[in-house]
Image (cartoon, rainbow, N blue to C red):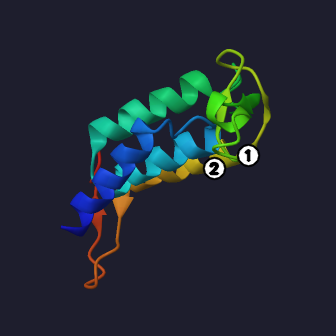
Amino acid sequence: ALADAARQSVEGRLAAGGAHTGWSAAWLALLRARAHDGDGLARAARHTLGQFASPSLLGLHPPMRPTPRARAAQCGGCVERRGAAGEGVFQLDANAGLAAALAEALLQSHSAECAVHLLPALP
């Protein structure tokens, strides 16, 4: 039940425009891996690498601008991406987050019994 609630929360965040920076896209990949959602992890990893990585695979934070809602003073923190994929400044967060997501896809041990789960989130 808790896992379903977490999935629903993630889907709601995505529907509201979440995962629009490198670190948040990598965080999404990590959540998918933790939930044993291999296909979702693969989509999130492709999105992270395709939108928020340089040709040398360095994580990038894209340039941002306020949304129309923010400009109308309805949402002080609402921003959207401006610019194309591969634009931005280097940020380590996306690299570290995506590496953690891939590690979660290969090996997990979060149960009370300390059981090790091999390959829990392969696509």
Quadrant for residue 82, please give it: top right
The answer to whether 86 appears left or right of 5 in the picture is: right
The amino acid marked with disc number 2 is Ala
- How many residues crowd around disc 2 within 10 Å: few (fewer than 14), some, or many (20 or more)? some
Residue at image position (71%, 24%) is 56
Residue 61: x and y in percent read: 73, 35
Relative to 20, 42 lies left or right? left
| Percent x, y of residue 55 | 69, 19
Q: Which residue is mark 2?
A: 96
Q: Quadrant of the C terminus?
A: top left
State whether residue 30 is above or below residue 52: below
Provide the secondary structure element on which disc 2 rests: helix
Dots 2, 1 in contact, CB < 8 A? yes
Q: Which residue does the numbered mark 1 point to in the structure image?
A: 92
Residue 5 badge: none
Q: Amino acid at mark 1?
A: Leu
| Residue at image point 71% right, 23% down | 54
Residue at the limit of the structure toward the top, as seen here: 84
